[in-house]
Image (cartoon, rainbow, N blue to C red):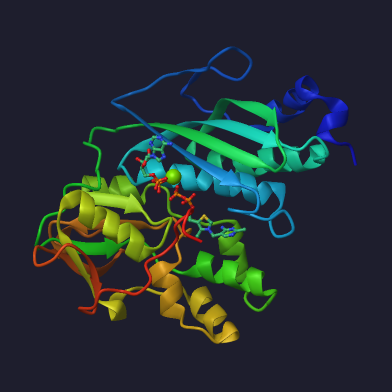
Amino acid sequence: MTTIGEIGEDALIALFAPRLPETDAEILGPGDDAAVVAVDGHLVVSSDVLVEGRHFRREWSTGADVGWRAAMQNLADIDAMGAVPTSLQITLCAPSDLDVDWVLDFADGLREACEPHGVGVVGGDLSGADQIVVSVTVLGETHGTEVVTRADAHPGMVVAVSAPLGAAAAGFALLDAGVDAVPEASQLFKRPRPIVGAGLEAALRGAAAMMDISDGLLRDAGRIARASEVGIALDSAAVPVHPAATSAAAALGVDALRFALTGGEDHALLAVFPSVSSVPPGWEVIGEATDAFAGVRVDGQVPDAVGWDHFSR
Ligand SMILES: Nc1ncnc2c1ncn2[C@@H]1O[C@H](COP(=O)(O)OP(=O)(O)O)[C@@H](O)[C@H]1O
Ligand SMILES: Cc1ncc(C[n+]2csc(CCOP(=O)(O)OP(=O)(O)O)c2C)c(N)n1
Ligand SMILES: [Mg+2]
């Protein structure tokens, strides 16, 4: 093994940069003080960070898995605005004893996730650190539609999700318990597979409010409720539970619905539509926006757990 400390920063960039995905939006890519990116419509920008030990463990995830996930959760944030992602800035902080191959593998994961969507890496930064930290900024653009915020749901509208939930949380629970029972769930934790483009389709069909679910359906529904000043009433029986979450829950002897309600990290979309007829095919209606109360209720009850909070555990 060769460490990044042995080859140094310039040699690492020289190996890393050619493996990165490219985008047609790139006017000037890695190698200068800043990148230059063409943009149509409005510029839509978001950042997310992945911290070793907090978001991933090196014994569970390969460099490619971390690259995939870093890209995907950022693509999902732009999609959740009803916009189209074009490019990423990637900052990698890492200990000098990290294997160069981990970094090259990380680039390959970024490329695998981005290439199908025409998204490129246009720049970033490197630093030493005691643990691996990956910070991603994603740039996107609107394509002839207004962005869909969290703030425009109204009472009487319907609440829907774009895909079955709970697989990533179930995979995390399996890995954490050291139970190798449902590889599909563990894989979906390491490499979530949101359908990039589902958000633009929802926007074109008139979605009023939308976000990707990262911290758990209930916590994130609460964010739409707060931003839109509505209540959200969910029907637990209507929430689609991913089959891998159901299998994992059986293996662990826990409740699969809990993975779907509070799990997060699937990066499926939660959206509020004016009516059932505007909900895109493949989505599931799980409840409605109300004005009877603030916050989220499940089957009429205030839930006891809602999802992930970085600072409260
Ligand atoms: N350090 C920060 N400075 C400014 N805004 C922040 C910061 N951290 C989070 N935010 C903003 O708070 C909002 C919620 O953040 P977050 O929960 O991370 O969203 P998401 O789940 O979409 O990644 C976002 O609009 C984000 O830009
Ligand atoms: C090692 C490890 N421990 C715990 C988790 C679970 N976890 C970490 S962050 C998170 C929530 C989503 O991450 P966040 O950074 O809040 O994403 P954002 O809301 O900013 O998109 C969850 C469920 C994990 N993925 N990996
Ligand atoms: Mg975030």
Quadrant where the image shows the N terminus: top right
Residue visible at 40% across and 58% down? 268
Q: Name above or below for residue 27 compared with residue 106.
A: above
> In the orientation shown, which residue stands out farthest toward the top?
33
On screen, residue 290 versus residue 143, left or right, reads left
Front-most of 16 and 235? 235
Q: Can the viewer see residue 207?
A: no
Question: Looking at the picture, how far across and down is residue 282, in whole percent?
Answer: 32, 64
Label total for image: 0
Question: Looking at the picture, how far across and down is residue 262, in whole percent?
Answer: 41, 68
On screen, residue 12 versus residue 75, left or right, reads right
Dividing the image into four quarters, tell me where ligand 1 lies: top left
Question: Looking at the picture, how far across and down is residue 163, in whole percent?
Answer: 38, 64
Q: Name above or below for residue 241 compared with residue 13.
A: below
> In the orientation shown, which residue stands out farthest toward the front?
312
On screen, residue 46 versus residue 82, left or right, reads right
Residue visible at 80% across and 35% down? 96
Residue visible at 68% across and 56% down? 57
On screen, residue 241 versus residue 40, left or right, reads right
Residue visible at 38% across and 71% down? 305
The quarter of the picture where residue 113 lies is top right
Q: Name above or below for residue 235 compared with residue 265.
A: below
Q: Can the viewer see residue 243?
A: yes
Front-most of 197 and 66? 66
Front-most of 294 and 275? 294
